[in-house]
Amino acid sequence: MDAIILQILNGLDKGSAYALIALGLTLIFGTLGVVNFAHGALFMIGAFCAVTLQRLLNLSFETIDPDKTDFLGQPLKVKTPYVESWFGPDVGATIIDWSVPLAILFAIPIMLVIGFVMERGLIKHFYKRPHADQILVTFGLAIVLQEIIKANFGANPIQTPAPELLSGVATLMDGVVYPVWRIVYFCFAALIIGGVFAFLQFTTFGMVVRAGMADRETVGLLGIDIDRRFTIMFGLAAAVAGLAGVMYGPINAPNYHMGMDFLVLSFVVVVVGGMGSLPGAVLAGFVLGILESFASTTWATTTIPGINQIIIYLVAIIILLTRPRGLMGRAGVMED
Amino acid sequence: MSKTNLTRRGVLKSGVGVGAGVALPTIFTASSASAFTNEPTGGSVTLGFNVPQTGPYADEGADELRAYELAVEHLNGGGDGGMMGTFSSKALDGTGILGKKVEYVTGDTQTKSDAARASAKSMIEKDGAIMITGGSSSGVAIAVQGLCQEAGVIFMAGLTHSNDTTGKDKKANGFRHFFNGYMSGAALAPVLKELYGDDRKAYHLTADYTWGWTQQESIAAATEALGWETVENVLTPLAATDFSSYIAPVLNSGADVLVLNHYGGNMVNSLTNAVQFGLRNKQVNGKNFEIVVPLFSRLMARGAGENIKGIVGSTNWHWSLQDEGSKAFVKSFGTKYGFPPSQAAHTCYVQTLLYADAVQRAGSFNPCAVVEALEGYEFDGLGNGPTLYRAEDHQCFKDVLVVKGKENPTSEFDLLEVVQITPRAQVEYAPDHPMFAGGALGSCNPGA
Amino acid sequence: MFGLDKKDTTLLLVVALLTLLAPFILNPFPTDSGLAQFNAGYPDLMQRFVIFGIFAIGFNILFGLTGYLSFGHAAFLGVGSYSAVWMFKLLSMNIIPAIVLSVVIAGLFALVIGYVSLRRSGIYFSILTLAFAQMSFALAYSVLTPITNGETGLQLTLEDPRILGTSATADGSIPVTNLFGLEMRSATDLVIGPWSFTFSAGYYVCAIVMLVAFYLAIRIFRSPFGMMLRAIKSNQNRLNYTGLNSRPYTLAAFVISGMYAGLAGGLMASMDPLAGAERMQWTASGEVVLMTILGGAGTLIGPVLGAGMIKYFENIFSKINDNVLHGWFAWMPDGIEDLTVAIIHPFIGKGWHLTLGILFMLVVIFLPGGLVEGGQRIMRLFSRKKATKDDKSKAKQPAE
């Protein structure tokens, strides 16, 4: 029983990341009709926003400690971060400790700007082009982005630890302990997803966007500048992916190809949920996360060897063959 | 005007009709002009450094490349000579190899066997490389080793830890200085017993591919011989990034040790996840729960950050060793690049020196002469104590380091501390040991 | 000639000439000059050019004609390689049975996957093929290791029970692949002054196979069947309303292109008897998509150009290191030399992915029809008058 609860929690946690990425993907597809292969790269850049902030906070000056020696036998240079010398060691250390949550504030403007620039500078010119071209150009962009990150941060993972306070484990019930940060991640994801839905549902802006998704031409005829709103939605989708990346850092250390690792999966999630369906993306994210977790148990892998390797794709194939519009896709939309 | 000529790459004169249906002399075999593939004719000799420059092991590849460049500099008489000064053989004199200046070409293995072979082939076919070395995974090492055997050049393996490289996939033209899974197990077991007792229940998480399996087999065998019990061995997909669903079952499995047979990004993630789930602070069966990572690398340890503290594993070499060879190497590497070398860099540097030395002693670049010079060769002063290149399987036998993540690192490089230097005698095994059985060296192939 | 019209015959002859003279064309620089770095005329790379050319030609029959974008074609190439290596291990080192088997097995595999995947179209079809290919890759890497040898890749060993032939040669090595005795890796060098050209038997075998494959592709493009496939691309619904069932046509195209992939895989294993699982990874499938689109989807020659370009980058650019750069720019004053090297450094050696990524983006943004369109634009610049040759561009319309 405990094991089942744990796997459900794991599934929800994986699902949070899938859902957040898929949400942005499907938002972009639904509004702009663009298949964005660079979305995984946005997730990765978000995580590297946290790395960058951590680096910035750790900017240090060097003092020489004559008592100790470095690996060459020369006097050791001791590094003291500027924040520690400005705010005192205690406050400074706390600021550094909280760098990941702080990175949320740091990442939002950056991701919005990246989103706007991407849409205005590149994606805009691809609305009328075939999906294949969109895939190719965004795939090229994804490669370029990840290579730039690699050139600056190296290929090895870089740890962005959670604050001390949030890094232990919590006992949820007897026999079920779970890492605090993963619980935080799930809550955070729920918050973001709720926020996006509320934004689309309860604001005038959101209403216009939804109308635009349903019938872009008519909305345009009503004299509404739908393009500008869609640009903002692209920025929003980028920010959602970026935040998902920032918060994911403490779970798994960011590296330059984490975006590619999630890219294929998140596409599968979008398709299973139904292209262009926001609730579908979220639902499919959680469902696939949970299925993946259960497929990883010893019980599953001994019953069907290798099931943990292929479960996601198997589900995608079954869904596409039996219910091509996906779990929650509207009938008739992208269904053939 | 045009004349058909015989060149270093060997070849034939008479007309070649494509599809002529006759056995033709080949690039790799038969040639009247040169005695072996890519015989160096001018005043220089070309070595091929085939390392991962893209993909997840790019950082290790970059460090390997630094070591190679340093080795070439030393061979040509530049720098401070590094380990050439401490090497027990004094055949090398800083005038290149056999008086020929050492040049090199580099390539990208992408950590894919196809790409690695393509890159190695271009070095052999286009650049005339006489020896190929490098790599940061066993799949690539075995693929390139097979190629070098066919092509008739020497392969000096870089970082490859699978038993198979010098086990069932061993080749006469291939040599490995790095240690292997069996040695990790044999070196770790006594230390684990000392630290954690002989009554432990181990849970293995194993990367689901050849290296992971051989490593798991080795560690399980070594620990079970101590009296440990292997509770469970779970295979994890290579592509896995989040290991939570594999870690969670460990909590209530009754196991009190977790063995992570992972490397690279897998290792960083599974260790991070294990620590997240509070395994380090757990008490099971009245004992502290422990995590073991059998193959450690400092570069990866850095990726795992704080999580590495107190975790025990094994490694081929570490820069904090205090023997003369290691000190000399760390000094010249550190002076040139500003940070200490990794174990990958060390093994690559040593392999280059060993190759050069073997050629020098054999007095010929002929692969068969080199093989003869390296087989059964005893040497010292290259950082691992007295070492033997065993003739039966071309595996180096030397001391193995058992290391532990340092609790209070003084710098970003000071992550591991040496717990014990396991003597060579303890990690030796018979060439026909079941874990290494099958496969044969074959005979050396000079390509001519 | 060969049942082709004049224009296609010319195209075929030009391609034939280019492939047969490739050892000269690809080695334009003297061996000892600094620019020899850019020479691509060595057997392995030339073989890869034509093998991936075959792969891309086959992919183009599906994608270029029907518009179905498969993201799983590498699986067929992988299956083909595995079949060929098994043939070498069990039957004979002759490449003919190996290639035949790889084409057949890849065709059967494509039939199964195609039958299922073609029930959907558009992006759903892409995801289905991607899912199948990823499953094949994941299983080949782990569970199917007894058949595929997993991470290490399937290789020949000295103990292979070869029915027709020996397990090992007299001198204790593994026998080499051959075509009735003609060893695939045999080669001859021709030295003219400072130039050196290598003629490899393996390359010419591949080249002839590619020419046959290319010829078949032309015939398919020009046949009523090809016309039907194009009709599917331009409007499948309308076609269905006329009472035609389009699925047998798409399935046939899918299987044919799968067989082309299998042929490429079999040839690859024949040149170098090794089959690795990463040949089936989705990135490998993505690579052939990139080749086709980069060269010009739906055109005859485009995919071959695209394949050549990508393989050139992978093999030539990745080998340029700082040392080589310093060699080239040694004539500059020291400071400027270092600066130049520092500027170029991120784009070569370990940065070749970056260069490739930038190149894709540029091509897709500015040349939607790929390299072929680029070529046509340049041609048009030079000969405005010949712009009437519209019929040529009909065959070379960009992908949709």
Image: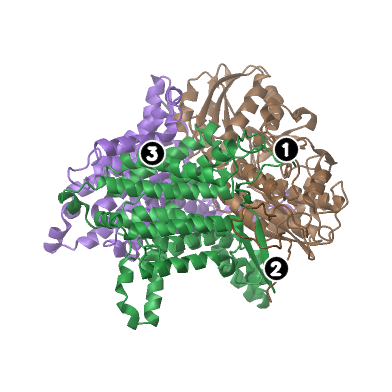
Question: Which comes before the other along the chain, label 2 or label 1?
Answer: 2
Q: Secondary structure at mark 3?
A: helix
From the image, which quarter does the N terminus of chain C lie in?
Answer: bottom left
The answer to which quarter of the image holds residue C234 is bottom left
Amino acid on which disc 3 is placed = Tyr
- Residue assigned mark 3: A185
- Real-space Cα separation, disc 2 to disc 3, in angstroms: 70 Å
Q: On the picture, is A170 further left or further right than A269?
A: right
Along the line of sight, which residue is nearer the eye, C136 or C333? C136
- Real-space Cα separation, disc 1 to disc 3, in angstroms: 53 Å
- Residue assigned mark 2: B4
Q: On the picture, is B430 further left or further right than A213?
A: right
The answer to whether marks 1 and 3 sit on the same chain is: no
Chain the render paints green: C
Would you place residue A297 above or below residue A218 in this image?
A: above
Q: Tag 2: Cα neighbours inside 10 Å, few (<14), some, or many (≥20)?
A: some
Chain the render paints brown: B
Residue extending furthest toward the left: A222
Q: Residue at x 67, y 30 (%)?
A: B438
Mark 1 vs mark 3: in front: 1
